[in-house]
């Protein structure tokens, strides 16, 4: 069975980043040095994206974190502020990753 192109493309991208930033990957491997469950409040990702000046795709972020052997589970959650239209709309797009 052949690996779908989108999976291969994402894997190649991760390998490229690992080659480009080996010290950062080593640092993350030190953080994830034993079985780890990762929980990400997606409401915090938006400020990261603004600070970085780019979009942070939750699917790609999950795939990147999945590339570390010690990561057992990755869960995204997002609280909703009642009456905040942006908060309520943002949640709808991330129900299933």
Image (cartoon, helix red, strand yellow):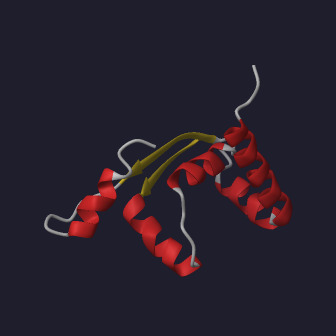
- Residue 91 horizontal/vertical position (percent): 31, 55
Please state the horizontal and vertical placement of residue 71, each as a whole percent of the image: 61, 42
Up the image or down, 65 lies above or below 69; here it is below
User: Which residue lies at the image location 20% right of the left edge and 65% below the top edge?
Assistant: 81
Above or below for 27 versus 69: below
Q: Is residue 36 left or right of residue 44?
A: right
Of residues 12 and 61, the one nearer the viewer is 12
Q: Which residue is found at the position 59% from the left and 52% from the top? A: 60
Please identify the quadrant where the N terminus is shown: top right
- Of 4 and 73, which appears nearest the observer? 4
Q: Is residue 35 visible?
A: no
Q: Give the answer, above or below, for where 66 lies relative to 31.
A: above
Above/below status of 59 relative to 42? above
Judge by depth and name the residue closer to the eye, 82 or 68: 82
Report the residue at 75% width, 59% height from top. 25
Q: Quadrant of residue 52?
A: bottom right
**Left or right of 58, for residue 2:** right
State whether residue 13 appears in this view: yes
Most foreground residue, 5 or 78: 5
Q: Hey, which residue is sitting farthest right in the picture?
A: 19
Determine the residue positioned at 80% across, 51% down: 15
- Total labels drawn: 0
Instruction: Find the residue positioned furthest to the top.
Output: 1
Image location (x, y in percent) of residue 66: 63, 43
Q: Position of residue 47 (x, y in %)?
A: 45, 75
């Amino acid at each position: 069975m052949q690996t779908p192109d989108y999976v291969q493309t994402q894997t190649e991208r991760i390998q490229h980043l690992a080659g480009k930033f080996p010290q950062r990957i080593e640092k993350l491997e030190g953080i994830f040095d034993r079985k780890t469950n990762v929980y990400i409040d997606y409401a915090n990702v938006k400020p990261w994206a603004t600070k970085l000046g780019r979009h942070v795709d939750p699917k790609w972020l999950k795939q990147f974190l999945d590339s570390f052997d010690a990561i057992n589970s990755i869960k995204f959650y997002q609280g909703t502020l009642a009456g905040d239209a942006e908060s309520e709309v943002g949640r709808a797009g991330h129900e299933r990753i």
